[in-house]
Image: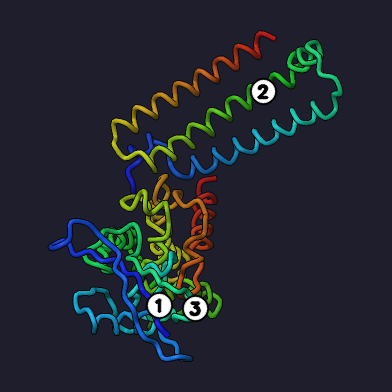
Amino acid sequence: MVNNAATVGRSGVHDYVLVRASAIILALYTFYLTGFFVTTSDVTFEIWQAFFGNFATKVFTILALISLLVHAWIGVWQVLSDYIKPALLRGGLQFIFSVLLLVYLAAGLLTVWGV
Amino acid sequence: MKQIFSIYRYNPDVDNKPYMKDYELEIPEGSDMMVLDALTLLKQKDPTLSFRRSCREGVCGSDGMNINGKNGLGCITPLSAVAAKKIVLRPLPGLPVIRDLVIDMTQFYNQYEKIRPYLINDGKNPPAREHLQSIEEREKLDGLYECILCACCSSSCPSFWWNPDKFIGPAGLLHAYRFLIDSRDTATEERLEDLQDAYSVFRCHGIMNCVDVCPKGLNPTKAIGHIKSMLLTRAV
């Protein structure tokens, strides 16, 4: 068995479930946004703001942002652990991507909260 | 008919780097032969050409090689099936080359060893004479026990190329499922425990190269899917 230290404590089963669950949420969010654009003929600033001011949209957006963080965190780790073999470079890149993903989440939360 | 072969040559004692060498072989019009037969004839011309072979009938799995870009067994691949003006023969990809078409399979066997490829029985309910299986229980092993460990599948799998020290690979996982599903084996829980990490099984992303190249027509991806299902069922 491969030591879980190599995967920062996560098991393959956790990753497998989290990647798929987050993918479902992201797919549903995509449908939700697509539905908005399809059913709205003229997207003005007021309509766009009202859409994101809606409580359900806020919750769904936050859920999608968290799902994106989880999905990308695991996905980037998998890609880096496949293609980048020097441990220091891999760790460094993982750190940069993880920070970027957290920044993306924080920025998204603050933006949605501010509407 | 003249058949041209381009064969990967590398002798670390003599060569600085690998190179491709062209050979010509005269094949009587209207006849056919296996890639291994052609290699044997070429070796008579050039005794320095090295490759593995043993049973020459697709049972031992010694002569796995990359034939025009696809892994297969030289002994059961007819030249007519390759049907190319130039047949390019390379060693199985992803594993270290010892010489010419001979590869070092240590990493492959290390992964095979990890799955404990033998029946484990705690002996708590020993049968009076022998462990009998019903027809249905025995049928579950079909499509699994036939693997000859030629490494065509594992060496065609990118996940195995990138992580040969951590990912078990399709051949090892096919065998792992063969023992997980065996009614006589009582170590299912321990076996699953050993496979639940993020590499051993879950590095398989189901691209099915293994199924495409298996010379015995087996389906490692399906077996890996069953292992994933067992791991998920156990977790939830």
Could you tell me residue A115's position as x and y percent? 70, 9
Instruction: Name the residue tied to disc 2.
Output: A61
Q: Could you tell whether B13 is left or right of A96 in the image?
A: left
The image shows a total of numbered marks equal to 3
Residue drawn at (63%, 12%) of the image: A111
Query: How many residues crowd mark 3 within 10 Å: few (<14), some (14–19), many (20+)?
Result: few
Chain containing the residue with disc 1 = B
Could you tell me residue B50's position as x and y percent? 23, 73
Could you tell me residue A3's position as x and y percent? 32, 43
Residue B179 visible? no
Under tag 1, what secondary structure? loop
Rendered position, A65 above or below B52: above
Labels 1 and 3 in the same subunit: yes
Instruction: Name the residue tied to disc 1.
Output: B127
Instruction: Name the residue tied to disc 3.
Output: B81
Label 2, label 3: how many angstroms apart (C-alpha)?
55 Å
Mark sitting earlier along the chain (1/3): 3
Front one among B183 and B216:
B216
Under tag 2, what secondary structure? helix
In this view, the mark in front (1 or 2):
2
Q: Could you tell whether B69 is left or right of B38 in the image?
A: right
In this view, the mark in front (1 or 3):
3
Front one among B193 and B224:
B224
